[in-house]
Image (tube, grey):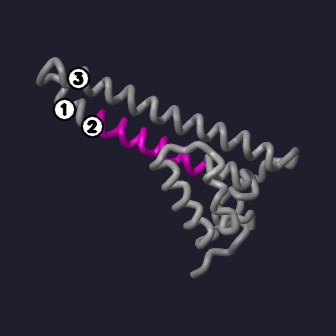
Amino acid sequence: MLGFKNNPELVEGHFFVGFERRFVEHALKRQAVGRTAIVKKLEQNYGPEGMLFYNAGLVWSVGGVFGILGTVCLLLPFSGTSETLPIIGFAFLVVCFVTSLTGLFRALQANRAGRRFRAGRPFEKIGPIWQGEAPSR
C-alpha cells in the first residue's frame, strides 16, 4: 500500500545501528508479504517512515525487557553468594534499562513521523483483530 516493496532505499536515508537496520529490513519484507489487518492499520497510522522507527523500537524494547527479566532471574538466587555478583548484575540492569529507553526514543520518533504522515487526519485505532477482516477458518 505505502510502497515498502518499491522503496528499499527508505532504510538507507536514516541512521540505524547495524542490527537495527537488518531487523527493520527483515520486518519490512515480512510485512509486505503477510499483510494482516493490524499491519495495514499500522501503515495507515504511521506511514513508511514511522514503520521504520516502530520496528527499530521493537528491537530495543524487546531486547531490554528480556535482558531485565533474565538479569533479575539470575540475580535473585545468586545475590547472597559474593559481593561482586550483585554489582555486576545491577550494572547489567542499568544497561538493559538504557536499552529499553532507546526503544522508547524510537517509539517517540515513530509517533512524530506518524503525525507528519497523517497531516491532521485522526489516529485510527487498531482494535481487536477480527474488526476489519473476518478471520479465516
Q: Amino acid at mark 2?
A: Cys
Q: Residue at x 59, y 40 (%)?
A: 106
| Residue bearing the label numbered 1 | 77
Q: Relative to residue 90, is residue 27 drawn left or right?
A: right
Magenta region, residue range: 54-73
Residue 129 lies in quadrant: bottom right
Distance between mark 3 and mark 2 Cα atoms: 12 Å
Q: Quadrant of the N terminus?
A: bottom right
Q: Are marks 1 and 3 in contact (CB under 8 Å)?
A: no
Q: Residue at x 17, y 30 (%)?
A: 78
Q: Is residue 64 magenta?
A: yes
Q: Is residue 135 above or below residue 4?
A: below
Comparing marks 3 and 2, which lies closer to the viewer? 3
Q: Residue at x 53, y 39 (%)?
A: 103
| Residue bearing the label numbered 2 | 73
Q: Residues within 10 Å of mark 3 (few under 14, many from 20)?
A: some
Distance between mark 1 and mark 3 Cα atoms: 10 Å
Which of the numbered marks, if any, corresponds to residue 4? none
Q: Are marks 2 and 1 in contact (CB under 8 Å)?
A: yes
| Residue bearing the label numbered 3 | 86
Q: Secondary structure at mark 3?
A: helix
Q: Residues within 10 Å of mark 1 (few under 14, many from 20)?
A: few
Q: Residues within 10 Å of mark 2 (few under 14, many from 20)?
A: few
Residue 16 image position (x, y, % from top left) = 55, 44
Given residues 38 and 63, the one toward you in this image is 63
Q: Amino acid at mark 3?
A: Pro
Q: Identify the main secondary structure in magenta.
A: helix
Q: Relative to residue 58, is residue 65 drawn left or right?
A: left
Residue 116 lies in quadrant: top right
Q: Residue at x 52, y 51 (%)?
A: 21
| Mark 3 or mark 2: whose residue is earlier in sequence | 2
